[in-house]
Image: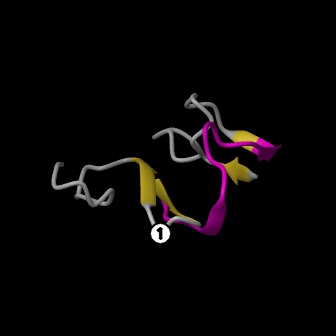
Amino acid sequence: MVWGSNNFGQLGDGTTVDRPTAVHSIGLSGIMTLSGGARHSLAVKSNGSVWSWGDNSNGELGDGTF
């Protein structure tokens, strides 16, 4: 469950609508750890894969792009 500012899609709910109450992120299951930055979010799944979404203007998503 996530909530807060979402102007960069950092909540992962498929929108850029701010959420004052908790909503589910889309397509995430088997999450072991979840972390949020100011404009991005990260999750580690039970299989060890890392997922990231939101703003990437400074390479925050770790996918080699900006």
Please determine whether, in this image, residue 33 is positioned above or below residue 45. below
Give the percent coordinates (x, y) of residue 32.
64, 70
Give the percent coordinates (x, y) of residue 3.
72, 50
Please determine whether, in this image, residue 26 is positioned above or below residue 56. above
Q: Which of 24 and 66 is in front in this view?
A: 24
How packed is label 1: few (under 14 Cα within 10 Å), some, or many (20 or more)?
Answer: few
Tally of marks: 1
In the orientation shown, which residue stands out farthest toward the front?
47
Task: Please give left or right for residue 32 compared with residue 23 in the image.
Answer: left
* Amino acid at pointer 1: Gly
For image coordinates 58% across by 28% down, the residue present is 15
Give the percent coordinates (x, y) of residue 49.
44, 62
The quadrant in which residue 25 appears is top right
Task: Please give left or right for residue 47 compared with residue 60 in the image.
Answer: right
For image coordinates 68% across by 50% down, the residue present is 4
Task: Please give left or right for residue 54 compared with residue 59 in the image.
Answer: right
Q: Please, which colouring scheme is shown?
A: secondary structure
The quadrant in which residue 62 appears is bottom left
Give the percent coordinates (x, y) of residue 56.
30, 50
For image coordinates 31% across by 60% down, the residue present is 60
Name the secondary structure under disc 1.
loop
Magenta region includes residue 4? no
Give the residues in magenta. 20-38
User: Would you name the residue on which mark 1 appears?
Assistant: 48
Magenta region includes residue 32? yes
